[in-house]
Amino acid sequence: MILFKYQYSTCFHVQEGGFFMKEKIISRRKNGMFMLLVTLFLYLAAIGYCVISVMDFPIGSQPVLVALSILWIFAGWILFCGLKVIKPQEALVLTLFGKYVGTLKDEGFYFVNPFCSSVNPAAKTRLKQSGDVDGGSHKGMSLGESVTGIESKNMKVSLKVMTLNNARQKINDCLGNPVEIGIAVMWRVTDTAKAVFNVDNYKEYLSLQCDSALRDIVRIYPYDVAPNVDTTGDGKADEGSLRGSSEVVADRIRDEIQRKVADAGLEVIEARITYLAYAPEIAAVMLQRQQASAIIDARKMIVDGAVGMVEMALERLNENQVVELDEERKAAMVSNLLVVLCGNHDTQPIVNTGSLY
């Protein structure tokens, strides 16, 4: 039997008065296939020797070898527990009797200490994220899993980029209006030791921190541009809003989430707003308000244009001395022009064939 010895030390570093795990990468030869063949060969040899001893061949008359063969048949399966298959973008965090040994990150077929156990507290956590899509089957098993019969693929920590899409949150903006907002966060694990040991469940931790960061940032902004609102913190009013500054808001949410989950060994790659609307209880009122504001702005533009056209008409008439109008006639002309220019419907011309007076 080949004995394997680990040289390990649990790595800590102190940060802000607390102890945090530091990832240790295990760099070793990919000797899983060799150990699998050796173990199977020893099994065949032990079974063959027991058969020979039962048939009273001279070669099988050694009781010590017979005892060792029987012991190997019943206990040799333990070595199968040390066979591990690592796929690309996967990691296996190993502990030995409660102590952190290290992390396997390179893909391949490995043999490790069979008494080492893999740790992933978030293995059974199912959030609304891409990495947790379950095909609905536990039918197939990979080579390492079928060989060991113990290690589940869920105990491996995925290093792939995953997308977290939490439920929509109802949050009051800086003006007190309830807003419903949803975000999608793209993230991945960068430090497996921090993710597994620093927090109880890194997936749930990320989900809670996403909701917390979303509330912290949304409360700074109004839904629409509002006067006298400072969203940047520089003491000056600006035109920032949830609807008009979605890119800026998303970047601030991403930075806030990253600050909160840094100690958990997670990297937030991107955050994007997927849904934004007023809460249903005020949606109808706010829609009427937006429609009224749009109508007022449109009317203002129409009136400004009509007044400018009337002024231009009067100036041109005076310059060319086409007709001389007293103040009463000017007022009547201005009134008629404004009615024509500002009306909602097309006007019907009336031709006066008599005297103006």
Image: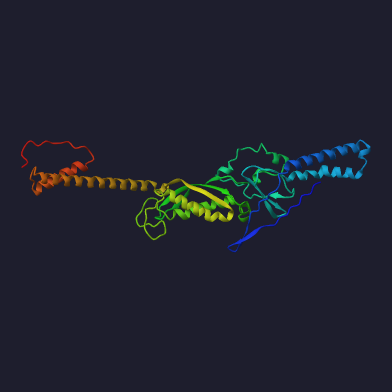
Q: Quadrant of the C terminus?
A: top left
The residue depicted at 64 percent of the width and 59 percent of the height is 12
Point out residue 301 in the picture as x, y percentages from the top left corner.
26, 46
Q: Give 253 or 171, whichever is nearer the viewer.
A: 253
- Identify the image quadrant of residue 316: top left
Residue 48 to residue 253: above or below: above
Left or right: where 81 falls relative to 235: right
Figure quadrant of residue 39? top right
How many numbered marks have been drawn onto this rendered protein structure? 0
Position above or below: 56 against 192: above
**What residue is shown at x 50% (from left), y 54% (from top)?**
256
Residue 82 appears in the picture as rendered: yes
For the question of whether residue 212 can be seen, the reply is no
- The x, y position of residue 211, in whole percent, is 51, 52
Q: Position of residue 44 (x, y in %)?
A: 82, 38
Give the left or right position of residue 233, taking residue 146 as reference: left
